């Protein structure tokens, strides 16, 4: 059983929460997250015109995605230690500046090398910003408002998930892929300006060394908690990566139906993220247990009702709503379990999530080849229920 709290360790200073919430700064962080995740998703919808313009294959252009993920994972593990003596306001502003620089590098890239350089810069910004999001939120609002603040910050992820790919594809056809990245840079400029006006000075806290990661992992419940995170996210990415072939081959859903179902997933995911704040203020532990349970039930229902497109659309939306609560819930758990080392805990969380993307896609592929689309749904259910 995963416990929902653990006291700070002796000798580790936990920053005192403010008496008054800085909601402007919270929304500025949400815009920053939206800009980062939007930029991360853009190559998926612009890969073909990017490859043609740069004179490379689509497979080579796809390394823009790999580069971002790899740098995000590495950054999440070392950023707290690498910036341990720097005011957190300046660190976050630097990440937003990197978002702008990344998109400008890609927009004006003469070749693939410049694109990969820009995408690597994005990976550093993405991994660093995500790592510090929970720790920053708990320093911007009173303790009782932390779940709500996190749900606002992570709503940027949900909105980007809904909008980035379809808007990127549409705008890429209308104005060209380079101009789309210029628009993404403009989002970064807005985020940087808003953060400049609203973020307070925040002195670094905690011991923040590379050894801190190991020390945090040795604390009671942390190792089990991170394993639970890995399994739940692997379950999601096992399911979601192979959702399209399931809907096409088992349910016979066409292109228009597929687009509608995926849009429903995105909207429901945003609703789940928004709902998470209220659920967590009531009971963190119960939310940790029930949402993966609900996801697993959806996986089983897919096996039973997979040939009914309307039922599939509803099940995908319910899965999206349940999963929408998961990142907020585990980020809140980090702030409660290791409040004195929330940045290091956040780094571990981001690294585990990045790892789960690769593991989930690989595991889903192996199961799909061996057992088909229904086997993927059963595997996703198993992963989601295992940590219970």
Image (cartoon, grey):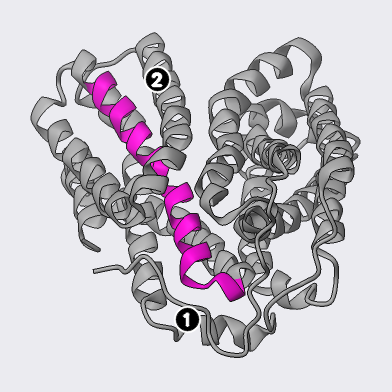
Above/below status of 151 relative to 265:
below
Number of labels in the image equals 2
Mark 2 vs mark 1: give the one in front.
Answer: 1
Residue 13 in which image quadrant: bottom right
The image shows residue 287 at horizontal and vertical percentages of: 31, 49
Q: Please, is residue 53 above or below residue 218 in the view?
A: above
Q: Quadrant of the N terminus?
A: bottom left
Above/below status of 6 relative to 128: below
Secondary element at image label 1: helix
Left or right side of 157 for 249: left
Residue at x-position 46% and y-position 49% = 327
Helix, strand or loop status at disc 2: helix
Mark carried by residue 217 = 1
Question: In the rendered image, is residue 111 in sight?
Answer: no
Q: How much space separates mark 2 and mark 1, taking CA atoms?
A: 37 Å
Q: Which residues are magenta?
A: 312-341
Tell whether label 1 touches label 2 (CB within 8 Å): no
Instruction: Inspect this view and state whether residue 7 appears.
Output: yes
Considering the image in quadrants, where does the C terminus appear?
bottom left
Magenta includes 322? yes
Disc 2 marks which residue? 264
Q: Is residue 134 left or right of residue 2?
A: right
Q: Which image quadrant for residue 71? A: bottom right
Q: Residue at x 36, y 76 (%)?
A: 221
Q: Earlier in the sequence, mark 2 or mark 1?
A: 1
């Amino acid at each position: 059983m995963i416990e929902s709290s653990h006291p700070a360790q002796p000798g580790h200073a936990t920053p005192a929460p403010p008496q008054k919430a800085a909601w402007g700064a919270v929304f500025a962080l949400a815009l920053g997250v939206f800009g980062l995740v939007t930029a991360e998703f853009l190559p998926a919808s612009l890969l073909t015109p990017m490859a043609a313009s740069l004179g490379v294959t689509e497979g080579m252009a796809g390394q823009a995605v790999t580069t971002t993920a790899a740098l995000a994972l590495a950054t999440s593990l070392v950023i707290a230690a690498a910036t341990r003596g720097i005011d957190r306001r300046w660190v976050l502003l630097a990440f937003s500046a990197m978002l702008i620089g990344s998109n400008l590098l890609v927009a004006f890239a003469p070749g693939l090398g410049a694109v990969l350089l820009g995408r690597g810069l994005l990976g550093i910004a993405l991994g660093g910003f995500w790592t510090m999001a929970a720790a920053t939120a708990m320093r911007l609002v009173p303790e009782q408002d932390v779940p709500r603040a996190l749900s606002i910050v992570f709503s940027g992820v949900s909105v980007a998930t809904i909008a980035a790919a379809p808007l990127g594809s549409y705008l890429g056809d209308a104005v060209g892929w380079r101009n789309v990245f210029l628009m993404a840079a403009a989002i970064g400029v807005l985020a940087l300006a808003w953060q400049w006006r609203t973020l307070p000075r925040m002195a670094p806290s905690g011991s923040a060394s590379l050894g801190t990661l190991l020390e945090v992992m040795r604390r009671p419940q942390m190792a089990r908690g991170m394993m639970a995170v890995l399994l739940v996210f692997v379950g999601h990415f096992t399911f979601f990566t192979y959702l399209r072939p399931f809907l096409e081959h088992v349910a016979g859903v066409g292109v228009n139906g597929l687009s509608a179902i995926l849009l429903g997933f995105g909207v429901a995911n945003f609703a789940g993220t928004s709902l998470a704040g209220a659920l967590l203020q009531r009971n963190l532990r119960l939310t940790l247990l029930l949402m993966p349970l609900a996801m697993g039930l959806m996986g089983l229902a897919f096996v039973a009702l997979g040939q009914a497109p309307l039922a599939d659309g509803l099940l995908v939306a319910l899965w999206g709503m349940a999963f929408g609560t998961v990142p907020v819930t585990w980020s809140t758990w980090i702030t409660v379990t290791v409040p004195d080392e929330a940045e290091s805990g956040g780094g571990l969380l981001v690294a585990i999530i990045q790892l789960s993307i690769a593991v989930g896609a690989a595991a889903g592929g192996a199961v799909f080849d061996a057992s088909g689309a229904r086997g993927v749904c059963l595997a996703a259910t198993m992963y989601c229920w295992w940590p219970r």
